[in-house]
């Protein structure tokens, strides 16, 4: 899972990143990691913070995506740490952030 800046407990790296890989953008029917929407993941004893973007600031499923990310990560944490999602627009998303799989599916 390239392109995601991860910091925090190493024992949680794989489960958290795999959980994120399973979150699907409902408009594109592709995983948010393959689309390149996730920028950073910070795991600390006080909580998990994810910084991500959407393909457009006007995306109508932003709230759905935040809920899906929180639920997916929360399911793999060994405790009741809160999970928060922050949407940022700088740097803006570009198609270059997509994985080869996403490019193939979208025909790019």
Image (cartoon, grey):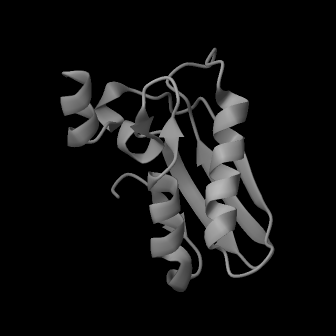
Horizontal side of 88 relative to 80 (left or right) equals left
Which residue is located at x 19 percent, y 21 percent?
107
Residue 5, given in percent of the width and then of the height, sits at 47, 59
Quadrant where the C terminus lies?
top left
Residue 87 in sight from this viewpoint: no
Q: Is 28 left or right of 80, judged from the image as shown?
A: left
Examine the rendering and report whether any part of residue 67 can be seen. Answer: yes
Which image quadrant for residue 60? Answer: top right
Residue 47 is left or right of residue 68, and the answer is: right
Depth order, front residue of 65/56? 65
Instruction: Please tell me which residue is depicted at 42% across the width and 31% down the height of the picture.
Output: 29
Q: Is residue 102 above or below residue 11?
A: above
Q: How many marks?
A: 0
Q: Residue furthest bottom?
A: 11
For the point 28% across and 35% down, which residue is it? 102
Q: Residue placed at 70% from the left, 75% from the top?
A: 44
Q: Is residue 25 above or below residue 39?
A: above
Residue 23 is situated, as x and y percent measured from the top left of the image, at 52, 47
Residue 64: image x %, image y %? 69, 34
Task: Determine the image quadrant of residue 97.
Answer: top left
In which quadrant of the rendered image does the N terminus lie?
Answer: bottom left
Camera-side residue of 28 and 1: 28
């Amino acid at each position: 899972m390239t392109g995601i800046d991860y910091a925090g407990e190493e024992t949680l790296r794989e489960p958290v990143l795999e959980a994120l890989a399973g979150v699907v953008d409902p408009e594109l029917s592709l995983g948010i990691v393959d689309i390149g929407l996730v920028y950073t993941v910070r795991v600390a004893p006080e909580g998990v913070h994810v910084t991500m973007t959407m393909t457009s600031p006007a995306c109508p499923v932003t709230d759905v995506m935040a809920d899906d990310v929180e639920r997916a990560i929360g399911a793999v944490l060994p405790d009741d740490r809160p999970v928060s999602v922050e949407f940022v627009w700088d740097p803006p998303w570009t198609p270059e952030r997509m994985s080869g799989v996403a490019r193939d599916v979208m025909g790019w």
